[in-house]
Amino acid sequence: MPANPDRPAFTSTSATIVNREAGGIAGVREVLDRTTRLSVWTFPFAATNRVAARLMTTAATYILADHRSVYIGESGKCGRRLLEHAADSNKQFARDVYVVSAFDPEWFDKTSAVQLQHRLIHSAKSAGLMEVRLGANPQDLLLPRWLAGSNNGMFDAVPRLLFDAGLRAFDSNCDSQIMPTIAAPGSGPYSDAEVGDNDDNGSMEIATTAPPDVEEFELNYFDLWARGYQFGDRFVVAAGSDFHNVENNSVREIIKIRRRALLDKGVLKSIRGVEDRRRFMVAIAFPSKAIAAKICCGAHVDSSKWQPVQVRRPILLTA
C-alpha cells in the first residue's frame, strides 16, 4: 500500500516517457510528462562532471540520494551547483542525482525551484521513508495567487515522476529505510546527562575525513582507548579507536542493531591476543556524541564519557 495514503491519488490516466539517449539501464535518463511540461533528469552521482554541462543555466530543484537518505536543494544554475557538490566531501554519500525542471524555462524559474524545494522537504519528512539531510533552511515564498496556483498544480505530479525515475523518498511499497528506533523510557536508572542523548535517530557515516583544527575528545570508560571530535551535527570517532565487544544488560536494541551493522560492514578489526575489543579501521561519523559513546562502550552511557584531550607540552626532538 502507498506509504503516504493521505496524498490524493491521481484520478486520471497519466503517461510517463523515459528517454535513455545513451542506452544502458542505470545511466543518464530523462523522465518526461508532456501534460505538466515537467522533466526529471536522473543520473549516477559519479557522472555529475559529465552531465552538469547541459544543466549550467537550468533553474531546478535537485535531489542527491543514496538508498537511505536524501539531500534536496535548489539553484538557478543547477549544473554549476551540482559541480560544487561533486567536489564537496559532505556530499559523497550520494549515489544518484534527480533534477526537476521543465521543458520551457518560463514555466520553471528560480522562484519555482525554491518553492518546490520547500514542498519536497516537507513531503519527504512526512513520508518518513528516508532520512532528510538538511542544509540551509528551505524558504516558503509568498507568491502571487496566480503563480502559486499554477505551480502547485504542476508540482502535484513531481512525486510521481520521481518515483518513475527510481526515487523512493515520497512513495514506496517497501518499509522505511531509516534505521528503526525504539522509544526510550521517560525515567529509569540510566538517565542521560544532556538533552538529546535519548535520541538514537540519524545515520552513521563510514570512512569520513577529519577537518583541521578541531577539539579532540578521548573516551573515559574502563581502559578503552578512543578519540573523537565534533564536526557539524555529527560526532566522528577516529580510526584506531577501540570498540568494546562486550554488551551489558542496559544496551537498547537500537544500539545493538547499530553495533551489528558495523560488524557486518567489516570496518572493525580483531586485535591479536585481545578478546574484549576490536579496532575501528576507518573514521565513523555518528549522529551524536552520546550515540558514539553507547556504541563504542557497549553500554547505556552518556556523552560525558567523552572528555576533552588534555593539552600536553609538545616534545621537540633535536637529534
Image: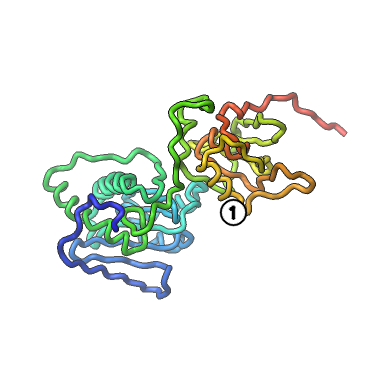
At x 55%, y 44%, the residue is 256
Instruction: Determine whether, in the image, residue 168 is placed left or right of residue 184.
Output: left
Residue 197 in picture, x, y percent from top left = 49, 31
Residue 262 in picture, x, y percent from top left = 59, 49
- State whether residue 293 appears in this view: no
Instruction: Kindly identify the amino acid type of the residue bearing the numbered disc 1.
Output: Lys
At x 46%, y 62%, the residue is 47
Vertical position of residue 65 compared to residue 17: above or below: above
- Extreme right residue here? 319
Q: Which residue is mark 1?
A: 265
Instruction: Determine whether, in the image, residue 28 is placed left or right of residue 164.
Output: right
**Quarter of the image where the N terminus is located:** bottom left
Residue 303 in picture, x, y percent from top left = 56, 29
**SS label for mark 1:** helix
- Extreme left residue here? 146
At x 19%, y 54%, the residue is 8
